[in-house]
Amino acid sequence: EKEVHTNEFGSFTTEFLLPSGGLNGEYELKTESGNALFRVEEYKRPAFDILFAVQEETFQLGDSLLVKGTVKTYNGVPVQNAPVRYTLTRQSYTGLRKLFTDKETLLASGNVMPDETGQFAIPLLLETTKPEEDKNSFFVYKIEATLTNEVGETQTSTTSITAGNYSLLLSAKINKLIGKEQPGMAVFSVVNLTDTPVNREGIYKLFPVTGAEKRVTASHPVYSGTFVSKKETSLSAWKSLPSGEYKLSLSVRDTQGRESVYEQEITLFSMNDTRPPVETKVGYYPLNTKFNASHPASFLFGTSEKDTYVFMDVFNGNRHLDSKTLLLSDSLMRFDYPYKEEYGGGLTVSFSFVKKGKLYQQQVDLEKRLPEKKLKITREVFRDKLSPGQKEEWKYIVKTPQGLPAVAEMLATLYDASLDKIWKNDQTLEVRYGFRLPFVNWTTEYVRNNYYSFWFPYTFLKTPEQVYDRLQTNLSIYKDEAVITGYGKPSKVTRKLSSAIRVRGGTNEITETETIANTSGVGSQGEVTGLRANFAETAFFYPQLHTNEKGEIVFSFTVPESLTRWNFRGYAHTKGMLTGIINGEAVTTKDFMLVANPPRFAREGDKTSIAAVLTNLTGKNLTGTVTFTLFDPMTEKIIAVQKQVFHTETEKTTGINFFFHADDKYKLLGCRFIAQSGEFSDGEQHLLLVLSNQERIVETIAMPVRGKEKREFSLQSLYNANSPTAVNRRLTIEFSGNPAWYALQALPVLSLPTEDNAVSLAAACYANTLAASVVKANPRIKTVFDTWKLQGGTEETFLSNLQKNQEIKNIWIEESPWLTGATNETEQIQRIATLFDLNRIQNKNHTALTKLRELQHADGSWAWYKGMKGSRYITEFVTKTLVRLSILTANSSDNEVQSMLQAAFAFLHKESVKEYQNMLQEEKESHTHIGISAAALQYLYLIALSEEKVPAGGDTQKAYSCFLKKASESLASQSLNEKAFSAVVLHKAGRINEANAFIASLKEYAVQTDEQGMHFAFNETP
């Protein structure tokens, strides 16, 4: 459970680690008013997919056809040299839309070969065993295709074809009540029996319908026309038709000439009608029920009954605005309601009457018409063909529905499209707006006939019949709602962000992997260029990107090195909850590609094979060598090298296999594939876990040794007290002499600001930038952390030994709380592994710096929190953090940081002058000497640290000189911490002798012990 804070757009971000002992399946993130679902699975990403062509044709029983499909990798390379295995089955249905079914019958199976483009065709005979007389009967033919490619990966896809005595289904998107003043448009749709839209031209006809009880349809249409499926059809020609009821008939023919028909009854009316167009008890005919200031609401209400008294009531929320009684006699009344601001979300109009002992009701909801709420998102810079490892910068433009630049926030992500094969990512961002209108209902409670009878042996009595001849209409009895009861409808405002797929191994940023040239071991090879090792499933996940004044969103990233297709998803919203979504696709590809298919893991003793496929898109035939290298990723020691010669024709693929034996010497293997042919080369590098085939027991003994000290330790308790069943005994002595590794564990805590205040944001910038600097200066750190993330816990990592057996570890931790340090250690390392992603660092730094800029006032000061006054203390703290960061990373070229520092120093100069002037006034009035304050000493320290130029002349220079003099005179009164600052200040100012005096004083208070070395036992002068 975490406490989070939303930003000005109402969004929040957080990070969490899933427990390693959890089950696979669906997980839920919950807040007080919402939730999101995601899945956790163990999987291997597919490299290719089988896609069937959309079946738009229509078929009849007995037809012979070819079911076509394509086999391609996700970056568009055809899969060759492997057969497609297929099975054909049939299932019969009787009754419309699969109401009844028979058992599935196997029709055929076989193999077909894809061509050079990856296309294949499966022959299918739509045979049936018996004639079907029912016109609604049909058969479903299921086609299942399976292919195993050259590297051993298998994928399966299915499709189906439906055939029967009919082939097409029609539907109409049209109102049943159509006002002739605004007839609008209609959409007529045609689909085949698999619900696939089919492009067809059809005919529609309109037949008058007469008669109230015995309805008669005319034999000749009053209007007819043609339509094209899925396209809008204008109904403007219906304006001239008389009001009344009509039957709309649609017809269309398939390729075999079979006709399909659809019929629907509609009613035409006019706002000038004085009586119902059809005989009806309750006649309600809406023309416009969504109204605003420029679009009044209009509708007709009436009845075909004679001499009818109708109760009409108008409500606005809980207010009863109007109540009247209408007298209608086979007539219609028109009602027009211009919108007023006092109506808010709208009006509810209730009509009720009783006729011949029966209650009739009609409620009319008039809702406020809402403006368009969809943002318009367009691509300004977007490339759909990328190269592995390429640096990219994309730009999107977000505009309001009116076309103006929007002040919006976007969540943007780019992930491997192959994940959608495992679980479809159908995320939406939708806000449904509506208003709470009351539900008004009349109820009747009376008894028409009551009989009470009693039976006695000698006497029969009967109570007289009770007849009620009146209806109580007084609305004031038992409060206002005694007769008319209002129930509020559920609010229509819902917010939905559908469940997401969490991609395993994804990072916010993609870092470059250093390839180390091997010069020792078996078959050592020279320097390798272009070796791909970064196969992250998420290229980036930026949750809080903001538009600039032009409505632009610009972000950069490094393309991962997988050869695949990528799905882009962008979800934008404003502070007023205008929303928009944009999707896109991009592929990473090369002219010459090597794609390996390593297993997820191997086990000790396995004879393992790893396959790879070569793809030649260079336009010429290639001959070359593929080198397969096994190495220890921790030491880069080469274990084994194999080579194979290949020949591949242009536009062709070639498969290769390498075999090796997995023993117990290495728990983690590096697998390197390099294909070279003249000027073309490609390669991949993977890590392969080697799991033990035995249960391991690990016991540890701490052995602290300092300096050249000699100590003895007893090992009698190891190996289960020297048990004879303990085999494969090993004794490992681990030594850690670099405390910097432990210091790194503190960085993840600082990298995410706990709150949006200046101190937390500055610390986050410090931790993230320092982490990036560490990675760039020491590329092997990334290799270690990648190993941690993949390996999950063996003696080659710094993880707790308890992590080896998750079940035992959980039991021990549950029963022994003192062991929870092992869990904390694991979590720390996982956080560190997440920290060292350069793209993530870049995004987090940008966010933190943007928020810091927002907290900086126009005078250069920083406030602790937004809305507070500028603080000298906070300004000095942030300035010191940013200055130290520039020094530690040797990078002071960040224009945004330098701009903030320039403004901050301007503020600090003014504050120093104020303090200087106040100090002079106080010394003059009190005739006492005032020493240097902590704020002034920090000011001098910042000048020394940043080498800021103090403005020459004037009060600023006087203040600086005064404070510097006071610092040099305060040796006897300062604390150890202040002496350290003063030593730096004086040394940077060129006053070396005075600085050395402070250093000598510091050394006098230093304490040295055998266990802790030299340190300060206290931070004050004794």
Image: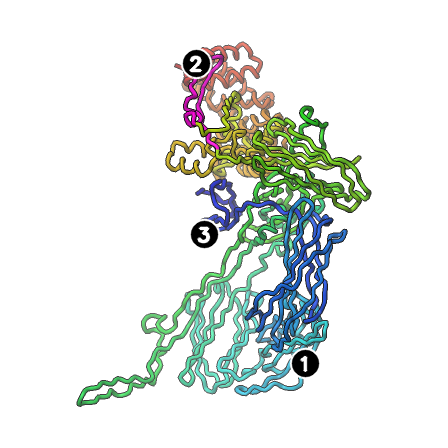
Element under label 2? strand
Depth check: 667 or 750 in front? 667
Q: Main secondary structure of the magenta part?
A: loop
Which residue is at 32% across, 85% downward? 449
Q: Earlier in the sequence, mark 2 or mark 3?
A: 3
Q: CA distance from mark 2 to mark 3?
A: 57 Å
Is residue 575 in view? yes
Determine which residue is flagged by label 2: 1009
Depth check: 640 or 299 in front? 640
Q: Which residues are magenta?
A: 696-723
| Crowd band around label 3 with a 10 angstrom C-alpha radius: few (<14), some (14–19), many (20+) | few
Residue farthest along the front direction in this orientation: 724
In this picture, is 817 found above or below 295?
above
Q: Nearer the viewer, mark 2 or mark 3?
A: 2
Determine which residue is flagged by label 1: 223
Is residue 231 in view? no
Element under label 1? strand
Q: Earlier in the sequence, mark 1 or mark 3?
A: 3
Determine which residue is flagged by label 3: 33
Question: Within the magenta stretch, is there residue 697?
Answer: yes
Question: For residue 611, which quarter of the picture?
Answer: top right
The spot of residue 268 in percent (x, y) is 60, 79
| Crowd band around label 2 with a 10 angstrom C-alpha radius: few (<14), some (14–19), many (20+) | few
Which residue is at 38% across, 34% downward? 817
The spot of residue 22 in percent (x, y) is 47, 43
Which residue is at 67% across, 32% downward? 629
